[in-house]
Structures are given as structure tokens and as C-alpha cells.
Amino acid sequence: MDGAESALRATFAQLTSPAALLAGGVFALALIVALYVARSLRVRRADAASVRTPHLLDHVLEGAILIAPVLAAMALLGAAHFVVGAIGVSTGAIDTGTRLLLALVGVRLAVYVLGLLLGPKSWVRTRESRITFILWAIVAVATLGWLDLIEASLNRVSLVPGRAQFSLWALLKGLVVVTAFVVVASLIARAIERHVMRLDQLAVSTRVGVSKFSYFLLVGLGVLLGINAAGVDITTLNVLTGAIGLGLGFGLQSVAANFVSGFVLLMDKSIKPGDVISFSSQLGGGTGPGAGGSAGNFGWVQELRGRYVVVRDRDGVDTLVPNQNLITTAFINWSYADQHVRLKLPVTVSYDDDPEIALKLLVEATAGHPRILRDPPPVSRLISFEPNGMLLEIRFWIADPVNGVNNVRSDVNRAIWRIFRTHGVRIPVPQQDTRLYDARTVVRPPVAPGPPPGFDQQAD
């Protein structure tokens, strides 16, 4: 009890000593200066913000703004070091604080540069502050000399009972090492992706496929190397890999099929970003999108992912189509090889009208439309004689299905309606006649006498 009280008194005396109080005041003043500088720079940065694409100089200035408050605090601590040293007070606490701030500057710059390399939407870029604080806390613990004490304490916590000791410290160390290897592998994969995407001589689908394959390969290799570097024998993971294979064979076979289908789509160049595709259940019936029917689920391919394809329709809605569906289900790629598409519009006219005049008017209805091609020219056909009238069809070509198909159909249908009304051509409407009879006025025919019931007069 007396030992604990004496240790407490010694600690209190050390904290209330003139050197400790002076160092505390200097630290508080440095914190106030850092907060003031950070607030001033934040306001000016918001006023000078622009929508243009940032260049290298903009990134350098942004990095300087991020570390400017810490540099201001370091400058104040440096000045306090000379002042406190001149009056004969120990500067050990101030020097330790300066080293911690210097470590904070290095960690903040490293995390900022790493976020720029991984891209604006990466997990590092969106969590820069939290990652910086965690890494700086680890560096601070090592700087203060507390790392050995923490390591010894965590090594005494065993997570796996038995001969093979697996402590909490080994787990944390393994996580840090694996994360470091994965980050490095991601940086290499991003660099390969940027280089491959600039190769215009390769198809877009091939470039995306190479980028995705290299990313998954390098990240997987980074995980294995990180596990090995953390001191875990990879051969001991045979049971785990066997369990994963069993899971893929039963519960995860659909996920695996989608991943494999994604690589097949990328390699066979059947679909690529920017293509216009549509799905229809009437592809073989002659009334699909190419035959003048509805365009089905019509949309633009935005990006190819490992498990699905992002397709955006005219309403701006993104549909995530599993890759396996694009392998096993028929779909229309309007821009696969040639973007020239023929559209067909059926029209029914009355039997009282001259079909030759109606066919000529159908061709005139397509004249003047900016998206309808003149070569090959539009043609009209008499398809069949229906119960309600004669079925005609106008056929024409367009070269830009990416700008929509139904809008051209609508324009031509409106033009047909106007030109038919002008020339008196009628579009018949199905009609049905209903006749009512009075049962009291119906005269029943006399019934001829027949053989008595029970006798069959038919010959065999």
C-alpha cells in the first residue's frame, strides 16, 4: 500500500513539475495554432474550389494544405525548445512531441499519396483520416518505447489452445502484414490497368478483361505472400482450401459461374462497355426488336464487373445483369459489328382503299427524317390479307440505334397518321355485330315420328 501511494505521489509530482507544466502549456498553444491554421486554410480552400480536373500542382498544394497545421505546430514547438532550453528547463517532453508531430506529417503524406495512387473512389481515399490516425498511433507507440510492453502483453493471450501457440499479437501482426501486401499488389494492379486501358489497338473488352484478371491475380498473390510473410505455413491451409472448394461445388456454384462467365464475356468480345443491348422473349418469332416489335429491355452497357454487367436504360436506372444470364440467354447486341439496323412498322388499311396508293404514302412518310438512311432506301410491302383489312409494312434502316429505336418508330407512325388522313386512307378498326332474337317468335319445326325408344334402327 505504501509503495503504491509513493508511486502515485511521485507521478503527481512529476506531472506538476515546472517542466511538465511548461511543456503542457506549449502543447496547448501548439494545438490552438494548428486548429487556427487548419480553419483558415479550410475556408480559403472552399472559396477557391473549382470544378476543373485537378493537376499535379493541385495535388501538391492540397497535400501542403493538409500538413500545414502540423508544420505550424512543429514550428511553435521548435521555438519553444530554444526558449525553454535557454532558461535551463528540460526540453525532453517538447522534443518527444516534435518527433510525434514529425511522424504524423510522414504518415499523413504517405496516406494521401496512397489514396491518389489507388484512385478517388478507393477505400483509402474515403477513409484517409481514420487510416492516418491508426497508423500514427502505432508509430507513436513505437516512438515512445511502449511497443515491446504491448507485444509482451498480447503474446500472453493465446487464441488457439494446444501445442501450436497462436497469440493475439500474431493475429494483429498477420493482419498488418497481409494488408500491406494487398495494398502493394493493388498499386501494381492499378498501374497495369492504367497502362492497358491506354492501348487503343486492343478492344475495350480485352483491355477490361486483362485489367480485371491482373487485379484478381495480383491481389490473390498478395494475400498468399502476406500470409506466408506473417509466419503462417501455406501448406496448412489445405483444409481451408478444400472447404472453399466444397462450398463452391454446392452453395457458391452460382457465384463461381458468374465469375467465370464474366471472364468469358471479356475474352470473346461479345459485349463491351458502350454497347447497346436488349432482351426479348420473342427473338425467334419474327416480332422481336429487329422485326418491328418492342425493343424489350433496351439499355447501354456501362461497365463489366466480375459478377455482373451494369446496363443503364433510358430512364437512368442501372440494372445489374448476372454474367451467367448473358452466356445462357439470347440477347440482341445492336452495336456488335455493324450499327445499321432495319426497323419494320406494320399498318392495316381498309379494303376500300387502293393498296398501291397506301404503299406509296408509307414511303413518303419516312422522307425527311434525319435518322432514316437513304441508302438502302425505305421500302413498303403488302404482307397479307387480314379479316379487318390489308396488312402493309414499311421497312427502313437507321445507323445509330444507340440514340434510341422507339423514338424513330414514333416519328414514322405519326407521319403515317398525318399523311393517311390527308389522302383519305382509312385504318380499319375491328368491329363485331351482336344480334338479339325474340324466343317467342321462333317457330319450331315439327318433329318427325320416330321409332319407339329402346330400338336401334341403324345397320352395323
Image (spheres, helix red, strand yellow):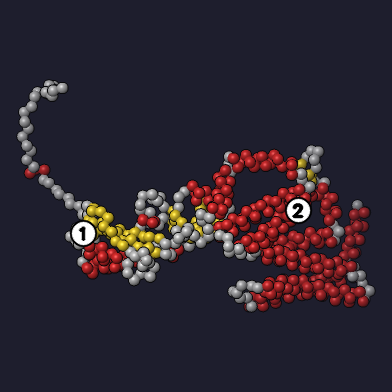
Density class for disc 1 (Cα within 10 Å; few <14, some 14-19, many ≥20) is some
Judge from the rendering whether residue 122 lies leftward or rightward of residue 258; answer left or right.
right
Mark 1 falls on what kind of element?
loop
Q: What kind of residue is marked 2? A: Val
Say which residue label 1 marks: 350
Residue 147 pos. (x, y %): 83, 56
Judge from the rendering whether residue 210 lies leftward or rightward of residue 88; answer left or right.
left
Residue 59 falls in image quadrant: bottom right
Mark 2 falls on what kind of element?
helix
Q: Identify the residue at image location x=32%, y=67%.
A: 366
Q: Identify the residue at image location x=7%, y=32%.
A: 447
Classify the position of the C terminus by image quarter. Answer: top left
Q: What kind of residue is marked 1? A: Ser
Tell whether label 2 touches label 1 (CB within 8 Å). Answer: no
Say which residue label 2 marks: 177
Q: Identify the residue at image location x=43%, y=65%.
A: 400
| Nearer to me, 215 or 455 | 215
